Amino acid sequence: MDALDLARWQFGVTTVYHFLFVPLTIGLGVFVAGLQTAWYRRTRKGGDGEHLLRLTKFFGKLFLINFAMGVVTGIVQEFQFGMNWSQYSIFVGDVFGAPLAMEALLAFFLESTFLGLWIFGWERLPRRVHLACLWAAVIGSNLSAYFILAANAWMKHPVGYEVVGGRARMTDLWAVLTNSTALAQVPHVVAGAFVVAGGFVIAVSGYRILREGSGGTAGMWRTSLRGALVMTAIAGIVVAGTGDQSARMLREQQPMKLAAAEGLRHDTAGAPFSVVPGLEVPDLLSLLAAHDPQAVVQGMDDVQRRYAAAFGPADYTPNLPVVFWSFRVMIVFGMTTVGLSVLGLWLTRRRRRTTALPRWFARLCVLALPLPTVAIVAGWLLSEIGRQPWTVQGELMTAASVSPGVALTEVAATLAGFTLLYGVLAVAEGVLLMRHVKAGPEPMPVEPVPSDEARLTPTLMY
């Protein structure tokens, strides 16, 4: 094992850990904003929205805990560009500078500023302004995701640039931001984030229903459960649709990744879809990748031969077991989560909040908590490991991206340090979330009932 291997492990460990918080933050922010919007609309019309306000504040705290952890763990990603990947930074710096600057100066500034106003604006800002602050923060988080995913998409399908003096120089910012790969990847990842957040809310709601039974505030948790089920089901449909579009782009832009995901060795017309090794569905891969059951899908051995002729002798095949099984874990766990949401919508089809939810389904909701997170992490592994051995497709290989002056012991020391630190943060995150979920929402303050004398005395301050 050399410094390159450890540098890849370090970036993989820190990135996957950071990615645990990103989708939950994106989706949960929208869910909390939806709850507060429902509360605002109902109380504005004179209705009883206390349960919506309690849910807003409860899930809002979970959102803030997750947001803070995401910010802390995300900073480390930038450090590694200078520490372990200086050659990569030199090559992509002129291209990445613009979208990453827009992410930091526009999106993250918008997100953090208005989130602060939302945190401290309760009872200080008008309700409409306070709600607008949360939506501004949510829009900022989604813009942040867009700019980062646009930069990531450029690594898979570089456009709007030229190579000058061994460095990629951006010639068209609009081409980078509207990269066809980005336009397919952004809705796919963001919709996946809504599935993750929906699964989280479903699990928390199921836990609270099991804890409180059919009495108390069970109706309130049925409301949050129902909202999360709707969000998960709709997002699941978007994930499936955008995933189909991404598969068709892989056939044209990253044929090696598509072949590795299916274990396809040779160019095949009417390529089968491999469910598991030894079990295939004829023509299905060609149908999914090109909407033509007899279309030719390139195989790994043939792509390897073409790449070697075009770019020079090297092994252009990614880690086959990881790519192959990540694809299947993503599909199975994601479809299971969406199927659970559809089942839940059927079971909660009656609109009354007092209708009891079957306890077996509530237990199923809790047990399904890790499924969407595992699915989206598996999808990210498929996306990033499937691109290997390239950091920038067709331009820069991973072996040429590492910092030449970093020794094996130095990378090992930082890897051990980051792993230990992230382990501590994981424990802290888990403890905070579980403590808050177990405690439940805080009771609403009871306004004092005025005495008879106070009722008869005019209020001079008005």
Image (spheres, grey):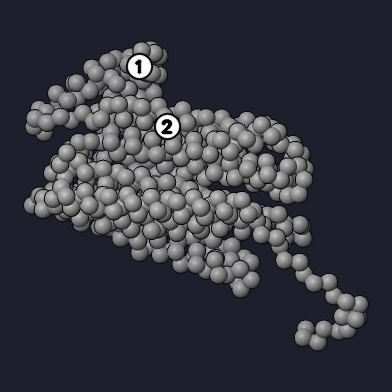
Tell me which amino acid carries mark 1: Pro
Residue 103, given in percent of the width and then of the height, sits at 35, 58
Q: Earlier in the sequence, mark 2 or mark 1?
A: 1
Q: Where, quadrant-wise, is the N terminus in this rendering?
A: top left
**Residue closer to the observer: 352 or 135:** 352
Q: Left of 447 or right of it: where is 293?
A: left
Q: Secondary structure at mark 1?
A: loop
Report the residue marked by disc 2: 330
Q: Residue at x 23, y 36 (%)?
A: 388
The three-letter amino acid code for the residue at tag 2 is Met
Q: Which mark is residue 130?
A: none
Identify whether 278 is placed above or below 6: above
Residue 340 % position (x, y)? 58, 32
Quarter of the C terminus within the rendering: bottom right
Residue 357 in view in this figure: yes
The image quarter in which residue 205 lies: top right
Q: Are marks 2 and 1 in contact (CB under 8 Å)?
A: no
Q: What residue would you read off at disc 1?
A: 277
